[in-house]
C-alpha cells in the first residue's frame, strides 16, 4: 500500500536551482536561496534532468533501468527514494502533485 | 590559439565581479579603479539587466557588485532584483557612507535579503583623523553605515587597507571592529601602487620595514583574536606565505596549500571574471588594461573558454620560477609563487613576471625577513 501512495506523488525540480555541468562525470546543483551546493554523479544528474518534468518514483526507476545497465532491482527503488527524499528536504526538488 | 597542454576549466565562470558604476562620492588615496573611473561611461539599467539574463544562461552562481560606489546608482535595487530573478546570489562592496535606514528597508523586499551574501564596508582607522587620511571625509558616515548593518543583523564584511597612515592604528582598529562594534572578523590588505595608489605611493604605500612592522602587529592581533583577521593579500597573507617559504627551504617540506616554484598565485581566472562599468570584460579588476571584449558585443562564454589572454594568464601556472625573468638566480625561486599577476603586469608590463611588491628576496634583504619577527 505504501508503494501505491508514493506513486501518487510527483516530483519536479526547483526552478531557481542552477545546474552546472562542470565535468563529464557529473555536475553540481546550486540553490541560490539557501546557498547550498549538491554534487551529482551521472545517475543523480540523470534523475535531476528527469525532474525537468514531473515524475513519480516508479517512472524515475523505470527511466533509470531503460538508460543504465545493471540497475539492481532490489536496491534501485530504495536508492532512488533516498536520493529524492534528500533532494526534497534540501529544497532542490519539490512535490508538484499528490493525487490522494 | 590556446596553449597545447591547457588546464581543464569549468565551462563558465562561477562568479562575475561587476563594477556597476564608475561614480564615487569619495576619492580614496589608494583607489585601484581611479584611472578607469575617468572617461568610461556607466551602462544603463536595461543593459545590465540584459547582461544578467545572459549570466543565467551561463549558470553563473553569484555576482559581486562594486564601483565606484555601488549605492550611488539610483537603480541599484532594480539591478539586484535582476540578479535575483536570474537565479543568482550577490554581494556588495561599498564605502558604507550612503547606507541609511531607508536603504536597509529596501533590502527587506522580496528575496533581496535572502540572496545577499554580505555587504563589505571599508574602514581604515579607529577614528576620523586616521581613517580620513586615506578615505577623506568619510569616517563618521562609514561607521554609521557599518553599525546600522550590524544592528540590523545584515551579513557583513569589513576591509581595512593597511597603509602608512593607519599602520600604528591597527590595534585600535581591531578593537573598534571586533570588540566595540562586534563584527565577527575583518579582512585586511595593503595599499598597492595602482590607480591613485600609484600617484600617492610615497604618501601611503608601506616600505619593506613598515610591512615587517605590520606583520609583527598582525601576529600579535592573531594571538589576541584567533581566526578573526583574514587576508588574501597584504602583510597578513605575506606573513603566511613567507613563513611557508622559510619552512620549505629549511626542511624541504613544501606547502600543501599552494604549488611552490611556479607562477601559481591567484586562482581568479579559473572561476571568476570581471566587468568594468562600461561593460568591458577584463580577466581581473587588477588587470583593467587587458581588455578581452565588451558584454554589449561579445560572447562572455566564448571569451572564458577561448580568449588567448585569459589562457595565457591561466597557463602562467606552468612557468617555473627559475625561468621567470629576474628570478633565475633567486635562492627562493623553488619556494615562491610569483604572487599577483595584476601587480606584476602593473609594475613590469608583463603578467608572466613575479610581483616585485611581494618579492621575499628583496624583503629579506631590507628587513632580515620574517625571522626578525
Image: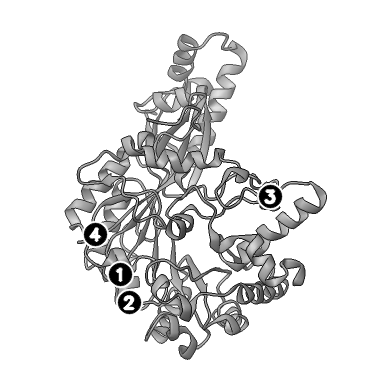
Q: Along the polypeptide, which appears first: circle 1 or circle 4?
A: 1
Q: Secondary structure at mark 2?
A: loop
User: Quick one: label 1, few (<14), some, or many (20+) residues within 10 Å?
Assistant: many
Do residues under tags 2 and 3 come within 8 Å of each other at their CB atoms? no
Q: Position of residue B282 (x, y in %)?
A: 34, 50
Q: Answer with left or right where residue B163 lies relative to residue A97.
A: right
Q: Are marks 4 and 3 on the same chain?
A: yes
Residue situated in front as seen by the camera: B179 or B95:
B95
Q: Answer with left or right where residue A71 lies relative to residue B282.
A: right
Residue situated in front as seen by the camera: B95 or B315:
B315
Residue at the spot 21% in from the left edge and 47% down from the top edge: B50
Residue at the spot 65% in from the left edge and 61% down from the top edge: B360
Label 4 or label 3, whichever lies nearer to me, is: 3
Q: Answer with left or right where residue B253 lies relative to residue B80.
A: right
Label 1 marks a residue whose chain is B
Label 2 marks a residue whose chain is B
Residue B71: assigned label = 1
User: Quick one: label 2, few (<14), some, or many (20+) residues within 10 Å?
Assistant: some
Residue at the spot 30% in from the left edge and 76% down from the top edge: B102
Q: Are marks 4 and 2 on the same chain?
A: yes
Label 2 or label 3, whichever lies nearer to me, is: 3
Q: Are marks 1 and 4 on the same chain?
A: yes
Residue B98: assigned label = 2
Q: Along the polypeptide, which appears first: circle 4 or circle 3?
A: 4
Label 3 marks a residue whose chain is B
Q: Is residue B126 above or below residue B62?
A: below
Quadrant where the C terminus of chain B sits is: bottom right
Do residues under tags 1 and 2 come within 8 Å of each other at their CB atoms? yes
Amino acid at each position: 500500500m505504501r508503494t501505491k501512495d508514493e506513486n501518487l506523488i510527483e516530483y519536479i525540480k526547483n526552478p531557481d536551482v542552477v545546474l552546472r555541468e562542470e565535468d563529464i562525470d557529473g555536475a553540481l546543483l546550486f540553490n541560490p536561496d539557501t546557498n547550498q551546493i549538491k554534487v551529482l554523479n551521472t545517475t543523480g544528474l540523470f534523475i535531476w534532468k528527469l525532474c525537468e518534468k514531473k515524475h513519480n518514483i516508479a517512472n524515475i526507476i523505470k527511466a533509470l533501468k531503460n538508460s543504465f545497465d545493471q540497475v539492481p532491482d532490489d536496491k534501485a527503488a530504495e536508492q532512488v527514494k533516498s536520493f529524492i527524499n534528500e533532494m526534497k528536504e534540501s529544497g532542490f526538488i519539490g512535490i508538484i502533485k499528490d493525487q490522494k | 590559439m590556446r596553449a597545447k597542454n591547457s588546464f581543464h576549466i569549468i565551462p563558465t565562470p562561477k562568479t562575475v565581479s561587476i563594477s556597476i558604476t564608475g561614480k564615487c562620492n569619495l576619492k580614496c588615496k589608494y583607489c585601484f579603479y581611479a584611472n578607469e573611473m575617468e572617461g568610461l561611461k556607466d551602462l544603463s539599467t536595461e543593459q545590465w539587466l540584459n547582461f544578467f539574463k545572459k549570466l543565467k544562461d551561463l549558470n553563473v552562481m553569484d555576482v559581486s557588485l562594486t564601483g565606484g560606489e555601488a549605492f550611488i546608482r539610483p537603480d541599484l535595487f532594480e539591478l539586484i532584483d535582476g540578479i535575483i530573478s536570474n537565479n543568482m546570489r550577490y554581494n556588495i562592496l561599498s564605502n558604507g557612507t550612503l547606507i541609511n535606514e531607508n536603504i536597509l528597508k529596501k533590502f527587506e523586499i522580496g528575496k533581496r535579503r535572502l540572496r545577499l551574501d554580505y555587504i563589505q564596508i571599508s574602514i581604515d582607522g579607529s577614528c576620523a583623523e586616521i581613517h580620513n587620511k586615506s578615505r577623506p571625509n568619510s569616517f563618521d558616515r562609514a561607521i554609521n553605515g557599518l553599525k546600522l548593518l550590524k544592528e540590523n543583523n545584515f551579513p557583513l564584511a569589513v576591509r581595512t587597507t593597511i597603509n602608512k597612515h593607519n599602520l600604528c592604528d591597527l590595534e585600535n582598529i581591531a578593537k573598534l571592529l571586533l570588540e566595540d562594534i562586534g563584527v565577527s572578523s575583518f579582512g585586511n590588505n595593503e595599499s598597492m601602487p595602482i590607480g591613485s595608489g600609484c600617484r600617492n605611493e610615497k604618501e601611503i604605500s608601506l616600505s619593506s620595514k613598515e610591512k615587517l612592522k605590520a606583520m609583527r602587529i598582525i601576529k600579535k592581533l592573531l594571538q589576541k583574536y584567533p581566526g578573526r583577521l583574514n587576508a588574501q593579500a597584504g602583510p597578513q597573507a605575506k606573513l603566511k606565505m613567507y613563513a611557508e617559504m622559510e619552512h620549505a627551504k629549511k626542511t624541504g617540506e613544501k606547502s600543501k596549500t599552494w604549488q611552490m616554484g611556479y607562477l601559481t598565485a591567484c586562482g581568479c581566472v579559473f572561476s571568476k571574471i570581471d566587468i568594468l562599468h562600461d561593460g568591458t570584460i577584463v580577466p581581473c579588476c587588477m588587470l583593467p588594461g587587458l581588455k578581452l571584449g565588451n558584454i554589449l558585443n561579445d560572447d562572455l562564454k566564448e571569451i572564458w573558454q577561448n580568449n588567448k589572454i585569459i589562457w595565457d594568464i591561466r597557463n602562467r601556472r606552468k612557468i617555473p620560477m627559475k625561468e621567470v625573468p629576474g628570478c633565475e638566480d633567486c635562492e627562493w625561486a623553488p619556494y615562491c609563487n610569483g604572487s599577483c599577476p595584476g601587480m606584476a603586469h602593473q609594475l613590469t608590463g608583463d603578467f608572466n613576471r613575479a610581483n616585485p611588491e611581494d618579492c621575499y628576496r628583496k624583503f629579506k634583504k631590507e628587513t632580515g625577513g620574517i625571522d626578525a619577527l
